[in-house]
Amino acid sequence: MTTKPVVRYALPADLQPDRLPQHVAVIMDGNGRWAKRRGLPRIMGHRRGVDTLKTLLRCCRDWGIRALTAYAFSTENWGRPIEEVDFLMALFERVLRQELMEMMAEDVRIRFVGNLAALPLSLQEEIELAVTETKDNQGINFTVATNYGGRQEIVQACRSLATQVQRGELKPEEITEDLFSQHLYTADSHDPDLLIRTSGEMRISNFLLWQLAYAEIYVTDTLWPDFDTSEFHHALLAYQQRDRRFGKLNS
Ligand code: IPE
Ligand code: IPE
Ligand code: MG
């Protein structure tokens, strides 16, 4: 029996380890265009996109980045042709099942954000299993945004707070930014420091609207299936050039 050699990514010498983003978020865009350029059906791009995500996750972990959040399916993506939606749901389920052992071996803690109750039941079960199995892993926090919409998330947080007020458990003036954050899917996680969007679109497409308030944004024309570790290296170099002022003045 042969065992697969374990690939470990060494941090490139021109990156400063103490100035890495703690949390990277990615809008994995351009799978369809990648496939179209090759005369392939769009789903081939999604398939290839999974490999890109696996490599990026491993790379983040090896380079000491604490958290990665990936946008896999938006609340608006239901509007695509049913064949593509069905393919994506089946792909998510299959990948989760196939990768669980690997995530355990790599010490990955996986979580999901989004309206999961609307996903196919078999996918919900696979999600629950993976989340429970990996909950004590500490190598990296990996969050997958599935049926996620920033506006939907904010509305559900408002409803939850309004219900508490209605029951007399909370006063309106007790609602603070911190408390509001606790009612989002991302409660207890750091806001992203760096947002990467592939395939050139200069928009955030309803991703983490609240949490991205002060993220550095990096957009590359590279299509998601082609976004490799050297592209990620470039993104981090760009990030380390940024002056994060958070509304204040330079020190
Ligand atoms: C991103 O790639 C993946 C999902 C939205 C699920 P796209 O499918 O949006 O690819 P393009 O943007 O059409 O090329
Ligand atoms: C954003 O990409 C959603 C995901 C990557 C899952 P889209 O392709 O859906 O976004 P738009 O339509 O270009 O804004
Ligand atoms: Mg797209």
Image (tube, rainbow, N blue to C red):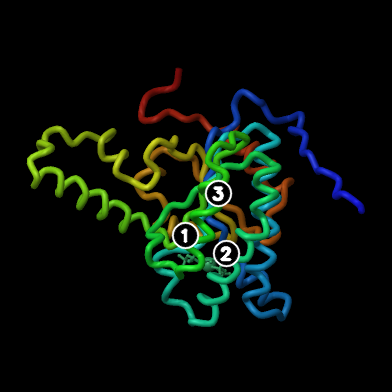
- The answer to whether residue 223 shows anywhere in this view is no
The local crowd at label 2, few if under 14, some if 14 to 19, many if 20 or more residues have their Cα within 10 Å, is some
- Farthest residue to the top: give it: 251
**Ligand 1 quadrant assignment:** bottom right
Query: Looking at numbered disc 1 in the image, what kind of residue is underneath it?
Result: Thr
Mark closer to the observer (3, 2): 2
Label 3 CB, ligand 2: below 8 Å? no
Query: Looking at numbered disc 2 in the image, what kind of residue is underneath it?
Result: Phe
Of 29 and 248, nearer the camera is: 29
Query: Looking at numbered disc 3 in the image, what kind of residue is underneath it?
Result: Ile
Identify the element where label 3 is drawn. Answer: strand
Q: Are marks 1 and 2 in contact (CB under 8 Å)?
A: yes
Q: Which residue is mark 1?
A: 146
Q: Residue at x 68, y 61 (%)?
A: 225
Q: Is residue 227 left or right of residue 76?
A: right
Of 62 and 238, nearer the camera is: 62
The residues tagged by marks 3 and 1 sit, at their Cα atoms, a distance apart of 17 Å
The residues tagged by marks 1 and 2 sit, at their Cα atoms, a distance apart of 9 Å
Q: Earlier in the sequence, mark 1 or mark 2?
A: 2
Q: Is residue 184 left or right of residue 25?
A: left
Q: Earlier in the sequence, mark 3 or mark 1?
A: 1
Q: Quadrant of residue 115?
A: bottom left
Q: Which residue is mark 3?
A: 196
Q: Which residue is mark 2?
A: 92
Mark closer to the observer (3, 1): 1
- Farthest residue to the right: give it: 1
